[in-house]
Image: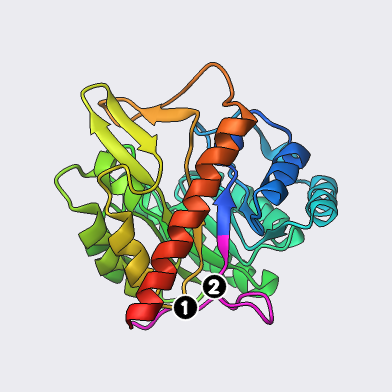
Amino acid sequence: MTHLHVPATPGRDRIVSISGAPYDGYPAPHMFESLARIGATHVEPAYIVGYTEPFDESSFTDERGAEYARWLADAGIGCFAMSSHIDLGRPDALAVFAGRMRFAARIGAKVINTNATARANEARFFQNIEPLARLAEQLDLVIGLENPGDGSDNLLNTAADAQALLARIGHPRVGLNYDAGNTLSHRPAVSPADDALAAMPLCLHTHVKDVQRRPEGYFFTALGEGEIGCDRILRAIAATPLSLSIEIPMRLHRGPDAQPSRAAWRVPVADIEARLTAALDYVGHHLAAARQAA
């Protein structure tokens, strides 16, 4: 399969977004102002249960979407991708994810990322994904299925699951949003960078984050300071049309059981900005080095 290229903004090539995850606890306008200060151009809003402050479906109304779009415009920040992870095989997934897709389109996103489903919910997942793919056509979105990090049994555990899964779905609006930073905690015996490279031909978007494995669990680090192999992944991305998001959930770590645990207090903005500025530099350096070497 060739790359599912999601067109970037006219006149631009690869988009590098910043996940909203490190800004957990801050209002969206404050996050956008901070991103503008560090020279970021795009945000990937993060609506992920367990990763961020609690939210419900009232966050995705038309009124909220219009407000969010206005905040983005005021700050001069774009939105190319949005994370809104649910199990697409759960009983209410069709209605819930359709509402989130409409919100994503309202704020300008072209990609909406989510998990696939627990293997036990496989039948309902395949019932739901067909109408969701048709809705993606109507909204000019693509759905990026992301490998989880919690150690459960999913339809998409590693790259080895992806080709058959996408072939069975059989729709060009559904592809992968591979996250090698999830692989380490989800399947610790699998090489994250090797798996990312195996998945890349099936990706329509990708996440880049780094992780250290410690006795206390899995900790998200500055890019290049963990064991994911982000340099290898970025060099491979450089040879593709893929856009990417830097995802560094600084308030979060995973325990030895791979379950997420949030700190009681939000991270100071100065610390977030320092970490993200370094991450943007790291990504830019490795993408440029790979282009020069090609």
Q: Is residue 5 left or right of residue 179?
A: right
Q: Is residue 17 left or right of residue 160?
A: right
Q: Amino acid at mark 2?
A: Arg
Mark 1 residue element = loop
Viewer can see residue 83? no
For the stretch drawn in magenta, the main secondary structure is: loop
Q: CA distance from mark 2 to mark 1?
A: 7 Å
Image x and y of residue 64, in percent: 81, 45
Quarter of the figure with the C terminus: bottom left
Q: Is residue 7 left or right of residue 34?
A: left
Residue 68 bears which disc, if any? none
Image x and y of residue 167, in percent: 34, 74
Residue 268 in magenta?
A: no
Q: Nearer the viewer, residue 233 or 274?
A: 274
> For the point 52% across and 73% down, which residue is it?
173
For mark 2, what is the residue? 14
Q: Is residue 63 left or right of residue 198?
A: right
> Which quadrant of the view contains residue 142?
bottom right
Residue 10 in magenta?
A: yes
Above or below: residue 59 compared with residue 216: below
Q: Amino acid at mark 1?
A: Pro
Q: Residues in magenta?
A: 1-16
Residue 241 bears which disc, if any? 1
